[in-house]
Amino acid sequence: MPFPSRRPFAALCLLLLSGCTVVRETTPSRTATEQLLVSHAVEIAADRLAAVLPTGQRAFVDTTYVRGDSADYAVSAIRAACLRHGLLLAPDKASSDLVVEVRMGAASFDAVDTVLGLPAMSVYVPGAFTTVPIPELSFFSRHQRRGAAELSAFAYDAKSGRALAFVGPASGQRDLDQVKVLSIFGAGGLQEEPGGKPKP
């Protein structure tokens, strides 16, 4: 009695043992870490700005010139900081005692990577329409991320237009500094750089 062919059995084993993993990655303009560093820097700058504005009056916060990727967050942070430091917010210029016009010089992100070895990378697999991530293989590496923001403002009497205060620039900075040795042992973390308060 002839033995059945082993080819179908071998093909079935190969089918069961074979497989693939598809790594799907999104590429937003900023990672979550970058967005948090920038937003924290904006909060710091807004607080330092509002700390030296005139208090106890109804103020209209004019944010016409707060523009950029983080503009909406910055506007909310500025208004919250003004309330926290004793200003009363007015809905428009007509119902305010003073107008605070704010401008944003910067709200962005810097990155510096130093790697002694092979940095992390993704290798394209021909025919598979995917990439394979390869982790960092280094003797020493340092990854520095910095979110920075700068705000300035001036306040004037809503009725007469007389200047009341010039404030800024008020800066905020938040750093993430991570060090690795032999790609395994790591140290570092978030830190806020000290900075002086802006002068009125």
Image (cartoon, helix red, strand yellow):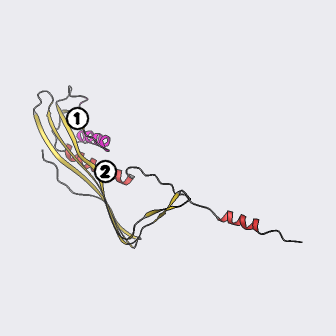
Rendered residue at 52%/57% (across/down):
130
Q: In the image, residue 46 lies at what x, y percent?
A: 24, 45
Q: Quadrant of the C terminus?
A: top left
Closest to the observer, 19 or 161: 19
Which percent across, then down, holds residue 50? 20, 43
Left or right of 165 on screen, residue 143: right
Taking depth in this image into account, of 185 and 148 the one nearest to the observer is 148
N-terminal of the pair, mark 1 or mark 2, is 2
Magenta stretch in the rendered image? 69-92
- How crowded is the residue under tag 1: few (<14 C-alpha within 10 Å), some, or many (20+)? some
Crowding at dot 2, Cα within 10 Å, few <14 / some 14-19 / many 20+, comes out as many
Q: Which mark is residue 45?
A: none
Q: Residue at x 62, y 62 (%)?
A: 19
Q: Position of residue 63 (x, y in %)?
A: 24, 37
Residue under numbered circle 1: 62
Question: Toward which corner of the image does residue 152 lie, by quadrant?
Answer: top left
Say left or right for 44 vs 52: right
- Residue 91: within the magenta? yes
Distance Cα–Cα, label 1 vs label 2: 22 Å
- Taking the image as shown, residue 199 lies to the left or right of residue 44, namely left
Residue furthest to the top: 94
Which residue in the structure is indicated by mark 2? Answer: 38
Give the amino acid at mark 1.
Asp
Q: Up-down: is 25 above or below 57?
A: below
Q: Is residue 196 visible?
A: yes
